[in-house]
Image (cartoon, rainbow, N blue to C red):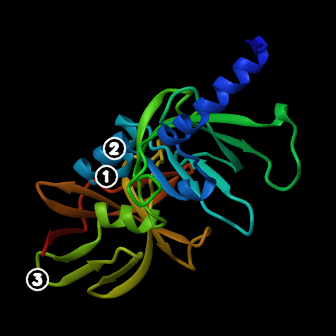
Amino acid sequence: MKRIPVLCSAIVALALALPVFAQTAPRVYPRDLEGIWINEAYLKALTETRMPHRAAKSAEPVVIGIRRHGRAYPVVITNFDKATVTALLDVQPDAKPGAYRMVLGPGDRPVSSDEVTYVHFRGQRKTGGGFDRLSIAEMQFMKGRWAEYAYLGTELARTINDLVIAGSYTDANGKRWTFSDVGESQWPDRSYLYELSLNDPTANCEYFTVEDMEATDGKGRYGYAWRDGKLHIFEARMADNRVRCSQKAMAVLTPQ
């Protein structure tokens, strides 16, 4: 009987093993990761406190956004204070089934191997494809520490507004206040487009900004806090480039 060379035997064995590997670790494409991913520990803290600055002190607010633009998949990674922008070039299987790595690099030109970075992740695909939860070893803000990330779809601001402040309220005089999840607010005597501050270590309070054409930077600011199930609204001002809120609330709002 003719002997098969050792190298040929190894190639045959690898070929036989490939279908098994493909079955346990199906191919993942950039489109399977498209959307917004948020650190679950931060999301839990935000849900419990309804105050983003406080939540950011207890858990790193890392958000990874992947959205297709033409043929490219730009990636934005932020902690709501700083951000990095790169592109998802490929998704490769890692050493174990269910383990993968994102290949990140410049998305506007061909790149060499020394220009890319790898972000390792693990996850179980849903029946219809894609993921709703991932374990990611993010490098920029988490320094490679593994953490669980939840899928938020494509509406980050809307989700956070809904968790923190969106709703209808009445004040002590029975007047109605509303904050919508799309950033619109109606007060008894005025209306605003508002934007929550998500991570400002220099401020002495939680706050949101509104348009104010009389302000030097075009923004007005109001503080807020949740206390005993009620939403307290405060006057706020800039002092030495820092937001400072009044100690006494200008309104105490009861959710309806």
Front residue of 109/230: it is 109
Give the residue pinned by disc 2: 54
Residue at the spot 33% in from the left edge and 43% down from the top edge:
54
Q: Is residue 137 left or right of residue 198?
A: right
- Residue 140 in sight: no
Query: Which of these two is toward me, 215 or 39?
Result: 39
Residue beneath label 3, please? 174
Callout 1: few (<14), some (14-19), or many (20+) C-alpha neighbours within 10 Å?
many
x and y percentages locating residue 237 in the rendered image = 45, 60
The part of the image, by quadrant, that contains residue 111 is top right
**Residue that mark 1 sits on:** 51
Label 2's element? Answer: helix
- Is residue 12 in view from this perspective? yes
Where residue 1 sits, quadrant-wise, is top right
Residue most toward the front? 1
- Measured in 3D between alpha carbons, the distance from the residue under mark 1 to the one under mark 2, in whole angstroms, is 6 Å
Query: Please, is residue 26 above or below residue 145 in the view?
Result: below
The residue lying toward the viewer, choosing from 56 and 191, is 56
Count of all numbered marks drawn on residues in the image: 3
- Judged by depth in the image, the label closer to the viewer, 3 or 1, is 1
Q: Amino acid at mark 2?
A: Arg
First in sequence: mark 3 vs mark 1: 1
